[in-house]
Structure formats: C-alpha cells, structure tokens
Image (cartoon, helix red, strand yellow):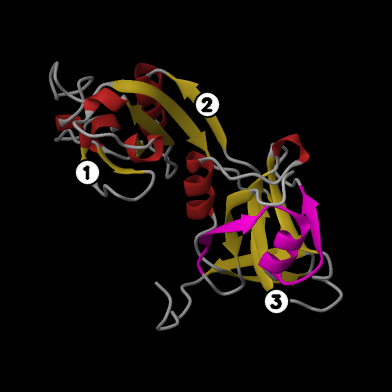
C-alpha cells in the first residue's frame, strides 16, 4: 500500500449520524481517524471490515452501534421480484419484503451513478397487494436524491410505455438482523478485501449508511441486549 493511498469510508461516532470520510489508508491514517490504537475485524462474513478502537473496553468508551449480520442481496428478474412481493402480501402478514430495481444508464437523458439509478421499493405498495382498489409503486433512489417517486408511470415494464425507464437488474434485499457485536467508541466501516483498507463501493456505502443511520442506546439486561434507536440533537455546525 502506497503512503498516499486514500479510502472513502463510513465513520460512526457515538450519539451522531454516520459520515462519509476520506482517510489515509495506512496505519497512521486509521489511528488518526478513530483516535487511538485500532483493530481490524470482519464481523459480516464478507469483504466489508470494521476498524475499531483496540482499547474500547478497557478505557470504557461509550456504546455506539449494535452491528448486525450482513444484508443478503439476491439478483433476480423484475418478474421474479414482483412475484415474491405478491406472494408475501397474499399471506396478509405484518411483514413486507424489500427490493432494489436498477434502471439502465440510457433510461435517462444525463449520466447517473448506479446508486442514483437504483430505486428501493417495498412489497407493501398497492401494485403488489391483492384486492387493492388502486395500482401504484412508490420508491426512492438509494442515494436519496430522488425521494418518494411514483415509479409505475416511468417504468417500461409497467405503464411507462416503450420509451420508459428500462430495468437493468433487480435484487431482493433481506436485511440482516442478528446482532454480531456491540461497538464502543468511534469506528470505520471499509472495504477490506485482499486484506487492505479500500473505499466502499457506492452501493455498500449507501446501504450501510442507511442501515446504521440512527445512533443507538444499548443495554444488556439479564443476558438480553436491548437496543433503542434515537435522534441526536444536532450541533449547530453539523450539516
């Protein structure tokens, strides 16, 4: 690793919303980013790593987030995704599925990143609920630049016509919920493939940012971990 290599990663601090930061991807840069000696761990069972304080327990740092198992993202056709949605809603359970629909670059008149072209939709849209009086599909772009859009009128696969937005690929997203670790003090989430600290992909960065967006209050009672998300008070200089 060269001395001037940079990495764009996520920084999580207790009581604060996550930040996208660019760090020096060398030991001194990691030390500076989290304010002390560090460990690199792989709690998600994939190439995503966490850089955390090595002394978090011994110096009594404040609890930060409960890290959960990795989300599972299964590629499928739009027909398969909508069938899964419809089947789930037919059960009339209080449980909904989540999907990502990625539109082709040439669906738009100007270039957009993949995260901007990826729209998050849920099975609890009217289009996927049996017996609904209307038909609508609302979604938001993964990067948050296009929010609560009524998509069925734009999509070629729905009511958008032959000149509508074309689908490149789709994913069924199953959020990981099993708690793996309780983090104390600041930590980074990075791409750790090839045993190196590298920039997160844009998709991973937005998904992890959203998954761990809210700070958490964490308490352990009789062997049971209780986690509560909350909205912190913002510093007037934060944006």
Question: Label 1 belongs to which residue?
Answer: 149
Tell me residue 83's x, y (percent): 37, 21
Q: In the rendered image, which quarter is residue 129 located in?
A: top left
Identify the disc placed on residue 86. none
To which residue does mark 3 refer?
A: 62
Q: Earlier in the sequence, mark 2 or mark 3?
A: 3
- Is 219 contained in the magenta span? no
Span colored in magenta: 17-41
> In the image, 187: left or right of 111?
right
Residue positioned 67% across, 65% down in the render: 33
**Quadrant where the C terminus lies?**
bottom left
The spot of residue 119 in percent (x, y) is 34, 38
Does residue 33 show up magenta in the picture?
Answer: yes
On residue 74, which mark appears? 2
Secondary structure at badge 1 equals strand
Q: Residue extending furthest bottom?
A: 236
């Amino acid at each position: 690793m060269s001395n001037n290599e940079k990495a764009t990663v996520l920084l999580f601090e207790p009581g604060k919303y996550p930040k996208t930061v660019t760090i020096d991807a060398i030991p001194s840069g990691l030390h500076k980013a989290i304010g002390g000696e560090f460990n690199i761990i792989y709690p998600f069972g994939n190439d995503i790593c966490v850089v955390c304080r090595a002394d978090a327990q011994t110096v009594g740092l404040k609890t930060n987030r409960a890290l959960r198992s990795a989300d599972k993202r299964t590629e499928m056709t739009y027909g398969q995704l909508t069938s899964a949605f419809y089947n789930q809603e037919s059960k009339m359970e209080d449980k909904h599925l989540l999907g990502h629909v990625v539109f082709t670059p040439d669906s738009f008149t100007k270039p957009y990143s993949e995260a901007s072209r990826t729209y998050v939709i849920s099975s609890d849209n009217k289009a996927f609920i049996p017996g609904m009086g209307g038909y609508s599909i609302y979604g938001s772009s993964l990067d948050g630049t296009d929010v609560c859009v009524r998509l069925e009128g734009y999509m070629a696969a729905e009511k958008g016509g032959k000149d509508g937005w074309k689908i490149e690929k789709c994913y069924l997203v199953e959020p990981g919920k099993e708690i793996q670790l309780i983090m104390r003090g600041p930590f980074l989430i990075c791409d750790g493939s090839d045993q190196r600290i590298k920039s997160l992909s844009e998709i991973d960065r937005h998904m992890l940012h959203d998954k761990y967006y809210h700070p958490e209050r964490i308490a352990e009672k009789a062997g049971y971990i209780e986690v509560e998300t909350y909205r912190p008070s913002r510093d007037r200089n934060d944006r």
